[in-house]
Image (cartoon, rainbow, N blue to C red):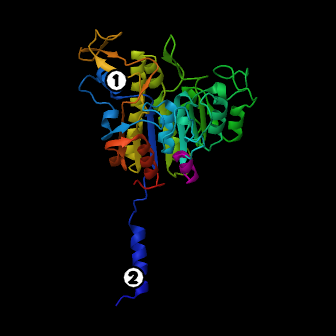
Amino acid sequence: MIGKGLIAVVSLLMAMAIPTDAGAENVIFIHPDGTSQGHFTAVRLLFYGPDGILNWDRLPNVAVTKNHIANRLSPDSVSGAVAHAAGVKTNRGYYGLCVNRKPLRTVMEDARDAGRAVGLINTGCITEPGTGVFVASVESRRDREEIASQILHAGVEVILGGGEEWFLPKGVEGRHGKGRRRDGRNLIEEARILGYTIVYDAKELLALPAGTEKLLGLFADGNIYSIFPPRAYKENAPSLAQMVEVALEILSGGGGGVRRGFLLVVEEEGTDDFSNMNHERMAIAAAKRADDAIGVALEFAKDNPDTLLITASDSIAGGPQIAKSKRGREKFTTPDGMEFSIIWAGVIRDYGSGTITRAYGKYSELISGTIDNTFINKVIRKALGLDSVE
């Protein structure tokens, strides 16, 4: 007869041998700002044809997402980002703040404190709320000096985007233009002291020294694109897909660090800005860049099964719809010769008619049916092993 002590030892050994469902180690959250089915349909039609397949299409779990906020049915970029970052509804314009104007605790801060590596990528200025509210809280989104400082000192291993002007003192010449900080601080020098490798263009990003563990990339003075003529992305700046690829290499431990899981938050800001300007061609180009980045993340997730890839927007910028070619201002042609155009619901407007969330990987099955924008935060936390989903 086996004694209780031996049974306890055997049970312990069996428990050690059986993997437990402790949550995915990695989460990649891609936020193509302001996008809707209309944006991705336009990309599909223009580049691949009506029957083509986007990387976005390859994410099998889909949910219609309610995106109202605390005081309005239609969110702005700030309050929409807070729902993703903190999992609560706040008022319009409350940058990292709850309805009582108190700073909120975010999933990225909890992931960092739990030992996960964290990264932020934005094709706009890095202070944009889609990434900034994950580690910063201020009274106004216009306080870019303070936002940039909080981001730099938040323990984020990878920071890639535009906004060099908010890292340099006013009048000091940088790689892309002159600084605009009125407090005299040089955040680039502070970044060097903190151990960041600093890069300024695609060539430098793709030639990082072996073993890079902390990276600051500033690829433009403001946004990495111009919304005014000539409308284009900066010629020497990396694509969003390139930034995601490099960030994944570093955060996953390939850059020389110890593999400990990570949270990477990625924003394509051009989809919002060009759509709010009702500029069809550049809105489609920005959405295509977002889809390319989703493709890079999807391949990583396939190779690393303990990864959740999730993509969602905060609102619908401009409200684009596909129409007959003669209805819109510009005519587009699919690869098989069919013509279409885009019509807009309005200029400089973010609409609250519901967005689409898609996901792939561990716990992606939680993205289904109709969900609230705050539920995205709960799924990210679950995938990082921080919380369970009720």
Residue 248 appears in the picture as rendered: no
Pick out the residue farthest to the right: 184
- Region of the chain picked out in magenta, as a range: 106-115
Q: Secondary structure at mark 1?
A: helix
Would you say the magenta stretch is mainly helix, strand or loop? helix
Look at the picture and state if 110 lies above or below 348: below
At x 68%, y 20%, the residue is 178
Q: Position of residue 232 (x, y in %)?
A: 49, 16
Q: Please give the residue where the numbered disc 2 appears in the rendered image.
A: 7
| Quadrant of the rendering where the C terminus is positioned | bottom left
Measure how far apart labels 2 and 1 are at the Cα level: 61 Å
The answer to which quarter of the image holds residue 142 is top right
Instruction: Residue under label 1, please give it.
Output: 43
The crowding category of the residue bearing disc 2, from other C-alpha atoms within 10 Å (few below 14, some 14 to 19, many at least 20), is few
Q: What x and y, as percent, mark residue 185?
A: 74, 31
Q: Is residue 184 left or right of residue 158?
A: right
